[in-house]
């Protein structure tokens, strides 16, 4: 059994909702706390940041060519190196935000991009360690993460099925079977035809682990659709203002959207119900009103033998059912019946 805090993570249960703040705090702790508080108000289970610094993931060559990483035409300040310097979360800020989350009763978690950042998250005591899609083939980092004994949430954007299998096997070889796999498309935002939500079902069949969804689509429809496929966790980028400067605000859910995801995902799980065909008590009561019963088609007297031409079928459904007609034909009446009156078993000899 996999648990994050008090919540069991399994397919077809209420999904664990992660508000992916990432770098949407823009290096501003006040903004980070506003985002956390808003995520709490929306009903999210956790907020997730990203733990990297100027040297964790980007080489000198990339800085020199000033690589752009966002898929948005929105302009950003300065160079890539200047943005990374401004946006990365300092070590002491991790602890500050962890305490703020604890105060507001929401889980703090993050994605590390180096062994040192893994160590930091262990000290912060996150409920799980999230592996970014870019690192699914970074086997040395996967081994190090797996050895910490924390649950591992593995994002699969850009990965082949073989690469996902290799990553899972690498984690398992470190005696860690606390794995959650996220279907993910690493485009911001993806086209509908490229989202392939059926991959959630495929991954459920391929792996004996809970399957979630790291969503980069716009709006709420796609993550909610994933819940109907049994998604155990939804990770959704989150902002309080889509017009803020920064890499991901434009493609993030705002509070109104995140609240819909949090609330309606629970309703979808309730509505999925069970595979066994059942009739609710409310529907049974409706049955009495909307179904038909056998009625007499003319005025009839005691002792008459009932023929099929003497009968009709009308609401309500509180008398003899239409599919019981074979037990009525040929019977004699033991009381007079008026035209259009319902037949009851006690009316028959």
Image: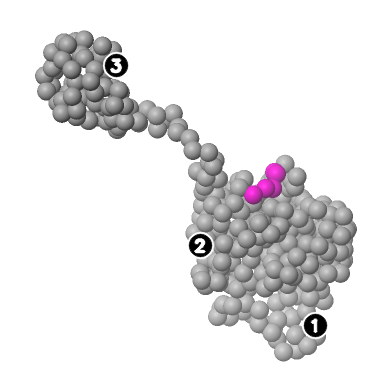
Nearest the viewer among 252 and 4 is: 4
Residue highlighted by disc 3: 345
CA distance for labels 1 and 2: 34 Å
Quarter of the image with the N terminus in it:
top right
Please name which of the two marks, 2 or 3, marks the residue nearer to the observer: 3
- Which residue does the image show at 56% across and 68% down from the upper left? 195
Image-quadrant location for residue 163: bottom right
For mark 2, give the secondary structure: loop
Residue 213 left/right relative to 56: left
Task: Determine the main secondary structure of the stretch shown in magenta.
Answer: strand
Say which label, 3 or 1, has the lower sequence index: 1
For mark 3, give the secondary structure: helix
The image shows residue 45, relative to residue 22, as above or below, that is above
Farthest residue, direction bottom: 65
The answer to whether residue 90 is seen in the rendering is no
Q: Are marks 1 and 2 in contact (CB under 8 Å)?
A: no
Residue highlighted by disc 1: 59
Q: For mark 2, does the 10 Å Cα neighbourhood hold few (<14), some (14 to 19), or many (20 or more) residues? A: some
Image-quadrant location for residue 56: bottom right
Relative image position of residue 201 (x, y in whole percent): 60, 58
Residue highlighted by disc 2: 219
Say which label, 1 or 2, has the lower sequence index: 1
CA distance for labels 2 and 3: 57 Å
Relative image position of residue 120 (x, y in whole percent): 85, 60
For mark 1, give the secondary structure: loop
- Start-end of magenta stretch: 7-11
- Which residue does the image show at 81% across and 53% down from the upper left? 177
The answer to whether residue 297 is seen in the rendering is yes
Q: Are marks 2 and 3 in contact (CB under 8 Å)?
A: no
């Amino acid at each position: 059994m996999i648990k994050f805090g008090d919540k069991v993570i399994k397919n077809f249960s209420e999904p664990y909702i992660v508000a992916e703040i990432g770098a949407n705090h823009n290096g501003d702790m006040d903004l980070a706390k506003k985002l956390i508080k808003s995520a709490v108000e929306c009903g999210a289970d956790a907020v997730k940041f990203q733990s990297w610094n100027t040297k964790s993931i980007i080489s000198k060559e990339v800085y020199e060519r000033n690589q752009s990483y966002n898929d948005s035409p929105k302009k950003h300040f300065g160079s890539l190196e200047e943005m990374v310097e401004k946006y990365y979360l300092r070590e002491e800020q991790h602890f500050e935000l962890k305490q703020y989350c604890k105060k507001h009763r929401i889980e703090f978690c993050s994605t590390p991009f180096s062994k040192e950042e893994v160590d930091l998250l262990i000290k912060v005591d996150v409920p799980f360690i999230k592996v970014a899609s870019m690192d699914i083939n970074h086997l040395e980092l996967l081994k190090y993460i797996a050895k910490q004994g924390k649950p591992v949430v593995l994002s699969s954007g850009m990965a082949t099925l073989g690469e996902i299998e290799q990553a899972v096997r690498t984690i398992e070889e470190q005696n860690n079977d606390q794995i959650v796999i996220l279907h993910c498309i690493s485009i911001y935002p993806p086209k509908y035809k490229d989202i392939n939500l059926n991959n959630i079902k495929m991954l459920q069949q391929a792996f004996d682990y809970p399957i979630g969804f790291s969503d980069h689509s716009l709006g709420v429809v796609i993550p909610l659709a994933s819940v109907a496929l049994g998604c155990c966790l939804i990770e959704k980028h989150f902002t309080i203002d889509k017009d803020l400067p920064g890499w991901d605000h434009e493609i993030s859910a705002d509070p109104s959207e995140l609240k819909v995801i949090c609330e309606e995902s629970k309703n979808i799980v309730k509505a999925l119900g069970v595979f066994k065909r059942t009739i609710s008590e409310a529907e049974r009561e409706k049955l009495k009103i909307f179904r038909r019963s056998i009625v007499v088609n003319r005025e009839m007297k005691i002792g008459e033998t009932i023929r099929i031409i003497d009968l009709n079928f009308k609401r309500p459904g509180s008398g003899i059912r239409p599919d019981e007609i074979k037990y009525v034909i040929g019977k004699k009446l033991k009381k007079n019946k008026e035209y259009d009156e319902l037949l009851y078993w006690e009316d028959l000899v």
